[in-house]
Every structure is written in C-alpha cells, then in structure tokens.
Amino acid sequence: MKSYEHIFFDLDHTLWDFEKNSVVTMQAVFNELSLQEKGVHDFDSFYAIYHEINEKLWAKYRSKEISRNELRWKRMYEALTHYKIFNEKLSHEMSDLYLHILPKQRNVFPYAIDVLQYCRDKSYSIHLITNGFELTQYEKIKNAGIDEFINKMITSEQAMSMKPHKEIFEYAFLLTGARSHNSIMIGDSYEADIEGAKTVNMDQVYFNPNKIEHPGTTTFEITCLSEIKNIL
Ligand SMILES: [Mg+2]
C-alpha cells in the first residue's frame, strides 16, 4: 500500500450532509416566504421538483452553459413554474434566503468528525477540494466544526477550474505541496472526484453510501466514512 501524506476530501455529500441540510433550509425558505399561500401546495413535492432541476442546472453550470448567478435563481424560478408561478423577484428572494440559511446548517455524515480526528492524529495533512463557492463553503465548515481539521481548502472559485478538470487538482498540489504519489482523494461523486483525481494520477476513495453502480474502477470504495480507518 502507498504511504499517503495528503488527504483531499470533497465537502458536499462527503463530509457535510448536503441533502439533509438542504431540505431543512428549503423548508425554512418555504415557510418564511409563505410559498404555500402563493400556490405551492405541498413542500415535499416542491422539494423533489427543485432537487431534480438543481441537478440539471448544476450540470449546465459545470459545463459552463450557465453562470453561477443564473444557477442560483433559475433553479428556484423553474421549480416555481411547475406551480404556474412565474415570478423572477420571488425566485431571487428564495435564492438569497436559501444561500443565507444553508451554510448555517451543521449536519455532517456519520463518523465525519471522528475520521477527521483520526487522520489528524495520524499526522496526515487534510485538505478540501470543493466545487462550491468560497464564502459559502467557508461558512459551512466553520459552523459544522470541520474547519479546525483543514489545512487548505481549495474551491473551484479560487482555482478557476472545477472538478473533474485537472487544473483544480494541479492547483491543489501547487498550494499544498502535495504530489500525486503521496495523495489520495475522497469523494462521493464518481464523475467529479474519482474521474477528476485520475486525471492527475491520484489514488481515490469513492464514498458510495447508496451503492450506486458505476462503470469504472476506483482505488478504494467505501459505504461509510468509518471505513477510511482501514485504508489510512
Ligand atoms: Mg460531493
């Protein structure tokens, strides 16, 4: 087994429980802006619609078809259109409120803090590589108590490149002094984290709690973060 020195974690859906935090946040937005009175009759179906649209628009954002700003409000706008609501102003209000509340949520995956503690005790340098936005991601890790474990956080905004593109990984190596032979990437996205790490010949741990089928290979695959202790 290789001897790793640098561990690069993904943040959303890997350490920080994005799904759980997002639902709680959207419920708050739903209540605060009285969406039910405006015609969105049911939160659960609204969230399901929003979720699907968000995935679709994130893919467009990753392939540079839409801007960050468009992603942020259009996901709200498109979700509202399912209820025959065509309201740009409300979409912006929802987006602002969502982005304000989301990073304050603190749900992390089981064993996240435990594993970070373990890696720190074993003297690994722990970093983040995330496709999120700089300020948002910083607020998330601070509020969730993750920040104290993190050496460097590399965001796509700062690197001006997104996973799976190799530039963000090269930037991360430059910033941390890490090299592909002594580094490992841990993430939940096969496309962004695993394929991305492969572009710079970095080993990978695919965090796959829902046991999603995938076509390729990974250095390691886990369904619970606690399994990292068997690898590192
Ligand atoms: Mg992720």
Image (spheres, rainbow, N blue to C red):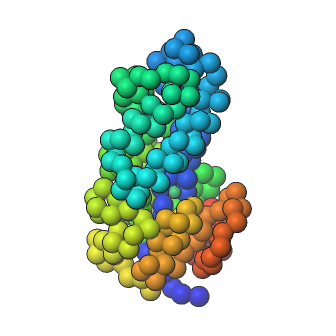
Occupied quadrant, residue 139: top left
Quadrant of residue 152 in the image?
Answer: bottom left
Whether residue 185 is visible = no
x and y, in percent, of residue 41 in the image: 62, 18
Residue 18 seen in this snapshot: yes
Query: Farthest top residue?
Result: 37
Above or below, 123 against 152 in this view is below
Depth check, front residue: 123 or 138: 138
Rendered view: 107 above or below 172: above
In the figure, residue 171 lies in which quadrant?
bottom left
Q: Position of residue 214 (x, y in %)?
A: 66, 69
Horizontally, is 131 left or right of 109 in the view? left
In this image, 1 relative to 6: left or right? right
- Name the residue rendered at 51%, 73% in the picture: 195
In front of the other: 46 or 18: 46
Q: How many labels were placed on the picture?
A: 0
Quarter of the image for the C terminus: give it.
Answer: bottom right
| Rendering coords of residue 137 (x, y %) | 39, 49
Q: Is residue 112 above or below residue 179?
A: above
Q: Identify which residue is drawn at 64% across, 52% down.
A: 110
Residue at x 70% of width, y 57% of height: 210
Left or right: residue 47 compared with residue 94: right
Residue 72 relative to residue 185: left or right: left
Quarter of the picture containing the N terminus is bottom right
Residue 182 vs residue 81, the one in the foreground: 81
